[in-house]
Image (cartoon, rainbow, N blue to C red):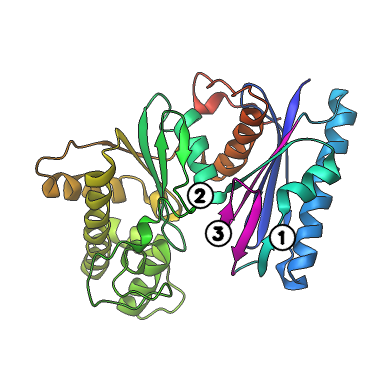
Amino acid sequence: MRHVIALDVGGTGMKAALVDKNGGLLHQARRPTGRERGPDAVVEGILGFAAELRAHGAERFGEPAAAAGVAVPGIVDEARGVAAYSANLGWHDVPLRDLLAERLGTPVALGHDVRTGGLGEGRIGAGKGADRFLFVPLGTGIAGAIGIDGRVEAGAHGFAGEIGHIVVRPGGTPCPCGQRGCLERFASASAVSLAWAEACGDPDADAADCAKAVESGDARARAVWQEAVDALADGLVTALTLLDPRTLIIGGGLAEAGETLFAPLRDAVRQRVTFQKLPTIVPAALGDTAGCLGAGLLAWDLLGTAAPAPSSPSTTDRR
């Protein structure tokens, strides 16, 4: 069976899969990234993991993978195949595409983790069929992927989609990027966790706890939640004014609150638009497989065989 290798490298863990031409996950595996051992060990771990996947595919399906796609965090030069910088992984200018191609003996595509996840969501997930979409995961920070006709825009310098650093509260909370009042300082899952922990007096409380408290009618939780929703709506309206997406896909940990997030968010965005066309606002559909599926799509695209969309995200083969 013809297949490709897909790797989604995170700050603490790696998710991997063998993906068929229909976007089916034929095999899945996970392991720690191993960043505590240093950047060189992380790179060797990625290479070794990919080689194991190649061997598994050759044994199980009678032929090695035709290509590989890899998603990594940080600053990524996709054209040169270089992982330029990652604070979490400690690397600088790692020629990861060439290193993997040499180890595997196959073509390799390298992509940014959020843009790659957005590619998966846009093409075969919640944005399937939309010619223009914006994917915004709300996690430790906030990023974005701008989808245009089945591809994701990287920008002239690889920074397209950094919606988390739109200033929504001028002069507000300092951000590590050097600005004050960035969106992710108010509306990310980590920002909500910090605000709720302070409001309720429990240092271990997190955003999921805040969502549950909102559902139970806690006034303090509602105030924290609404502040985050308002900031998020401000940032999203700025983005949709510039980009005019047909579909707005919200993912990440905060989106797991479901309608506790989406009902007030849709209302807040609706109240803020004037001349803009209101996009469809939907939750992400692929969960934590988005990165692997997107990396698989990168690999198939490299071969000139873009994986067609399955009838629905739930039909993905997870053997």
Q: Which residue is drawn at 36% across and 46% down?
A: 258
The quadrant of the rendering that contains the C terminus is top right
Check disc 2: other Cα within 10 Å, few if <14, some if 14-19, many if 20+: many
When the figure is inspected, residue 319 is found, relative to residue 144, above or below; the finding is: above
Q: Residue at x 22, y 49 (%)?
A: 237
Residue at the spot 73% in from the left edge and 68% down from the top edge? 39
Neighbours of disc 1 within 10 Å: few (<14), some (14-19), many (20+): many
Circle nearer the N terminus (3, 1): 1
- Residue at 28 percent across and 72 percent down: it is 181
The residues tagged by marks 3 and 1 sit, at their Cα atoms, a distance apart of: 18 Å
Circle on res. 75: 3
Are dots 2 and 3 in contact, CB under 8 Å?
no
Marks 2 and 3, Cα distance to the nearest angstrom?
A: 11 Å
Q: Which of marks 2 and 1 is in front?
A: 2
Label whose residue precedes the other's in the sequence (2 or 1): 1
From the viewer's perspective, is residue 141 above or below residue 67? below
Distance of mark 2 from mark 1, alpha carbons? 17 Å
Kind of residue indicated by mark 3: Ile
Image coordinates for residue 113, horizontal then vertical, percent: 56, 50
Mark linked to residue 114: 2
Which range is magenta? 67-87
Could you tell me what secondary structure mostly forms the magenta stretch?
A: strand
Q: Which amino acid does label 2 sit on?
A: Val
- Answer left or right for 80 relative to 32: left
Asked if the stretch drawn in magenta spans residue 266, the answer is: no
Residue wearing tag 1 = 33
In front of the other: 96 or 217: 96
Asked which quadrant contains residue 102, the reply is top right
Q: Percent position (x, y) of residue 159?
A: 45, 55
- Amino acid residing under circle 1: Thr
